[in-house]
Image: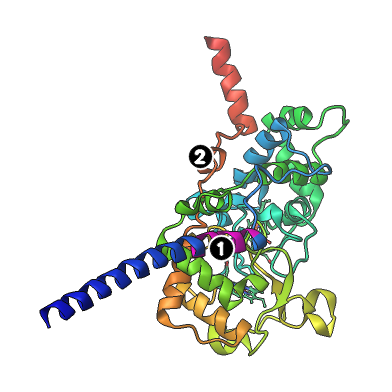
Amino acid sequence: MWCSRFRLAALIAAVAVVGLVAATFDVRGATDDLLAQAQQVFQPLPKDMATPEFPIAPERVELGRALFFDPRVSVDGTTSCARCHQPSLYGTDGLAKPHGAHDKINPRNAPTILNAALQLNAHWRGDRKNVEDQATQALVGPTSFGNLDYASAMNRIKGIPGYLGMFERAFPGETDSVTPDNWGKAIGSYERALVTPSRFDQYLSGDARALSATEQRGLRTFLETGCTACHNGPGVGGGSFQKFGAVEDYWNETKSAEIDKGRFDVTHDEADMYVFKVPVLRNVAVTPPYFHDGSVIALPEAVRIMAKVQLGKDLAEQDIADIVAFLGSLTGELPDHFRNAPVLPPNAFEAAGDQATGEGR
Ligand code: HEC
Ligand code: HEC
């Protein structure tokens, strides 16, 4: 009796050990398998986002960085790109809808500019070709800088003596290099250098331990739920336009005050009704509020809504928490040249004042 009990215990112990070993192998196998699956749908961020057409030149980056942070291009001197794309908020402004010159409110939420140049187009509705086109058109946007035309915007820049030399260095050999086109190219060059690699990139490069067990579980849930049908590639989004509310009307869940028809208002094609660009999810954990209208403040709620309206699924609380943990691993390092604001070229009268004191020395 004692003996058989002992045997039973030994048997149980042996089974347990075998089970444990098998489970360990299983976990190892599953981990490798998860990494391999992830590598099929995502890629690590590139070093920068330069293209042959839009190269990154140091002189352009320096100029573009200054212009990005300079509010003096706006009609009332209140608004720079950085007003709505703040470094301390990972290139967003924390508001549902940002305020521009004369406090005019934008119709849509400000997405982050970090890694933005990866995307197929710019803006929620894709109505800007690329970051260069975006920056140029922002000059005369009524809800950003408030300039009535390009000429008056350029005159504001030309009124700041230091910029002339900076434009000449960035665009050598051009007779008048202070143009809206070059403004766009310079700022675009700067934006193409704004890449934020995170632990997820380490993971995708083959280091399975770069993500915690919870984050890996979240990644698996993200893959298995079907989020990657739209959120894929190096940006974890940014590669296509999709209907917001593929399964049911988005506003049922977001409680949006106004219903935005999305890309339809740009193309007037019925197929584009409620279609928006799939946003990049890089740094999403630190860039609330969410969606094109900033209607949702908390990330778990945004994840719940996505599963419901895009995939017709009711995710369990635990699955939502796991996905949120995974999304946290997409928060990257801010480049120093974005984290720290530049010192801007002085105004004309300040520059003159400097010279006067210079003479006295
Ligand atoms: C008043 C606030 C405001 C200012 C100023 C502003 N932006 Fe934006 N930005 C926005 C909003 C809002 C959007 C989304 C617009 C839309 O999709 O309709 C946006 C979109 C963008 C995008 C596209 C991102 C994406 O994922 O599609 C880029 C890039 C960008 N801005 C860069 C800039 C640059 C560069 C400047 C300065 C030249 C600038 N912004 C000035 C509010 C602002
Ligand atoms: C059919 C395509 C599709 C699928 C599937 C999908 N999404 Fe989205 N996702 C979008 C689109 C389009 C938006 C932009 C909606 C808007 O605001 O107009 C978006 C927005 C988001 C946002 C808000 C980002 C921001 O910066 O505002 C999050 C977070 C998100 N998705 C996570 C997920 C998760 C998690 C899943 C899986 C449960 C998922 N998505 C599945 C297309 C999709």
Give the number of the mark in front: 1 or 2: 1
**Front in this rendered view, residue 311 or 243:** 311
Horizontal relation, residue 200 to residue 261: left or right: left
The x and y percentages for residue 85 are: 57, 54
Q: Is residue 277 above or below residue 358?
A: below
Identify the residue at image location x=46%, y=52%: 210
Splitting the image into four quadrants, where does ligand 1 fall? bottom right
Tag 2 residue? 340
Identify the residue at image location x=55%, y=63%: 34
Q: Quadrant of the N terminus?
A: bottom left
Element type where label 2 sits in the image: loop
Quarter of the rendering containing residue 126 = bottom right
The x and y percentages for residue 359 are: 58, 11
Give me the disc on residue 165.
Answer: none
Mark nearer the N terminus (1 vs 2): 1
- Magenta span: 30-39
Tag 1 residue? 33
Magenta includes 34? Answer: yes
The x and y percentages for residue 148 are: 76, 57
Horizontal relation, residue 117 to residue 342: left or right: right
Quarter of the rendering containing residue 273 = bottom right
Q: CA distance from mark 1 to mark 2?
A: 40 Å
Count residues near mark 2 (Cα–Cα under 10 Å), then give few for <14, some for 14-19, many for 20+: few
Q: Main secondary structure of the magenta part?
A: helix
Q: Amino acid at mark 1?
A: Asp
Quarter of the rendering containing residue 252 = bottom right
